[in-house]
Amino acid sequence: MIIAIAGFGDLTRYVVEEFPIAGHQVVILTRSLKSLLHHPAVRQRVTDYSDESLDEALADCEALISTIVDLSQSYVDVHLKLLSACQRSKQCKKFIPSEFAGNARDFPDQPAYFRHFNATVREALRGQNEVQWTIVCVGFFADYIVPAQNRYIRDMREGSLINYNVKEILVPNSLTDTIDMTSARDVIRGLAALVRAPEWDQFTFMSGEKTSWENIAKLIHRRHPDFVARVKTLNQIIDLLAPGNSDDDILFAQLLLYSASGAATCPEQAVSQQRKKLFGTVTFRSLEDLLSKA
């Protein structure tokens, strides 16, 4: 299949490596040519995201995946343009927006800093029937359990929960809280399989491992005994959300709330069913697997 990828971010670097292995050709939609891209199965097409530009860029593509992340109205504007382009296209009738967070099915307004943007895009997706779409839910990217030099995924702009610079794990709410963690590379391998599925559910769940913050802390501490786990209680998180705090503090508190609310935990039954149905060829690695190779 010829798969279009909107944006050249951290996830796209995994796409460039993994999609050709899965037999796909890749078309990167970008505002400017990137010197990092050198692969016979990967092409770049410069676009200004106008209708004419997108129509030309998607002319031979069969599915479109967005990796664009932007905490502004631009995120909505670009995604609506991408959806419209798929609606106009003769064959590009599958679209995956750039969410890749937690259980959006049961917690549609988490993470809070994306809630209005995501709601607008989802409303547009549900309001049409020409284009297949799905929201991909993965919990947290497991890559954050290893140092930055061992991953393409950069530290979250919202703040670091696992901070190798200060040797600290900041735990939202409680050590016993569970979350799902999935390697970014495994997510991309999952997407390479997902695009071939004839029909999609509205929500697609992937998980490398369901675990607790306590287990994460123990795993890291075994390899790095100088790491310290510090709990930020729910009341402390709520205090950070109070008016008068800085925008950065509020953004970080919303990230903490994403975990504390349970939104970063994927439903086990859906994960199991979709793994059998969609991802039989994909190996989702555990945190131990990732740490052992770091």
Image: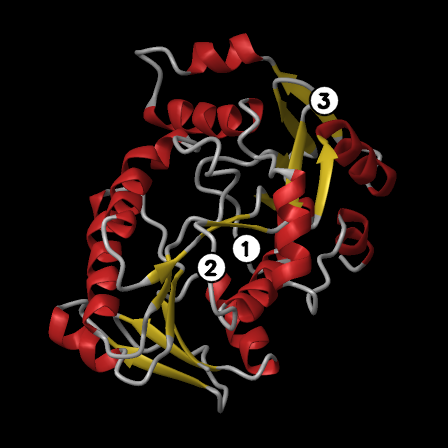
Taking the view exactly as shown, the residue that stands out farthest to the right is 222
Q: Which numbered circle lies on residue 215? A: none
Task: Compare residues 259 and 219 and report the one nearer the observer.
Answer: 259
Query: In the rendered image, which residue does mark 2 sit on?
Result: 200
Q: In this view of the protein, can residue 80 be seen by the observer?
A: yes
> N-terminal of the two: label 3 or label 1?
1
The type of residue carrying mark 3 is Leu
- How far apart are the alpha carbons under marks 3 and 2? 35 Å
Rendering coords of residue 225 (x, y %):
84, 34
Colouring mode (rainbow / by chain / secondary structure / one colour): secondary structure
Q: Residues within 10 Å of mark 3 (few under 14, many from 20)?
A: some
The type of residue carrying mark 2 is Trp
- How far apart are the alpha carbons under marks 3 and 1? 25 Å
| Residue drawn at x 64%, y 37% as measured from the top left | 162
Q: Residues within 10 Å of mark 1 (few under 14, many from 20)?
A: many
Q: Are marks 1 and 2 in contact (CB under 8 Å)?
A: no
| Residue drawn at x 75%, y 48% as measured from the top left | 287
Query: In the rendered image, which residue does mark 1 sit on?
Result: 153
Task: Compare residues 189 and 35 and report the one nearer the observer.
Answer: 189
